[in-house]
Image (tube, rainbow, N blue to C red):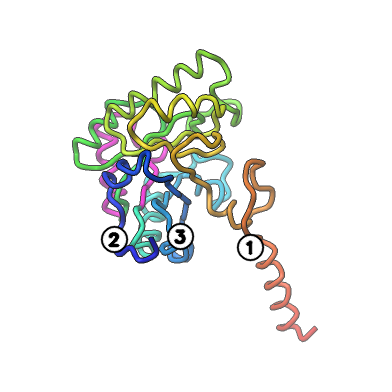
Amino acid sequence: MGGRVAPLSAADLRSAKGLRRLAVLTAYDYPMALALDGVGLDIILVGDSLGEVELGYDSTRAVSLEMMQHHVRAVANGATRTHITGDLPVNTYDTPQQAVLSSMALIAAGAQSVKLEGALIPQVEAIIAAGIPVMGHVGLLPQTAEGGYRKQGRTQAESDQLVADAVALDRAGCFAIVIEAVDPAVSKRISPAVGAPTIGIAAGTACDGQVLVSTDLVGLLPDPPPFVTPKANLRELIIAAGEEWSRQVRGT
């Protein structure tokens, strides 16, 4: 995997279903993209989660298309061997026409595909018709979540709707589908019901792959989500390095 010279295509990624699990991490800037480009990832997601973990906003809803273009461009400068998916931010795909134009902007910035939240089938079909691969997203939808983030699919009706949404996205042509913050039993229903690989986050182990926010993975922020076990503690290393530098400058 480390010797790959070109990113996997969306068709390659979809065909991985049933053959191997997909590994996905987020990146938002050049240094992280450069570091992650050779580690064996299938996809680097430039998520609108950057609004919270990079820019310090309360939600992803503060992220604009221009911000996403900026960060996709930075990631594309660092990651040349890994498929890059860019998130379409809130209110940039309200209609099929707008969805196509917004997707074209992220592709021009360096993404190979785009992701949108919810079973917006006309938008998905329009983007794919324009030649741009689409990753779907069901379960918790941060852009429109009301009353805070909570586990989805806890009732039979919710579970049935999530399965129906995923099936609709699959039939519309999505090459992969993110399942976020759902009861693991729902993931067990969705994954075998769709031809696209499912990529879980806080959704149990029944998915065909997993995605994680890279800043959570490396311990760059305090208080990671409860479902994350950081693999490093960069925050403490940065604090220690800053303190050592301050002492060195002052000669103390």
Residue extending furthest toward the right = 252
Residue nearest the viewer, comparing 72 with 7: 7
Upstream in sequence: badge 2 or badge 3:
2
Residue 59 spot, x, y in % from top left: 55, 39
Q: Which residues are magenta?
A: 84-109
Residue 141 spot, x, y in % from top left: 48, 31
Upstream in sequence: badge 2 or badge 1:
2
| Picture quadrant of residue 92 | top left
Q: Residue drawn at (28%, 60%), measured in percent from left and top?
A: 6
The amino acid type of the residue labelled 1 equals Leu
Local SS, label 1: helix
The label nearer to you, 1 versus 3, is: 1
Residue beneath disc 2:
6
Local SS, label 3: loop
Res 29 label:
3
Residue beneath disc 1:
234
Residue density around tag 1, few if under 14, some if 14–19, many if 20 or more, within 10 Å: some
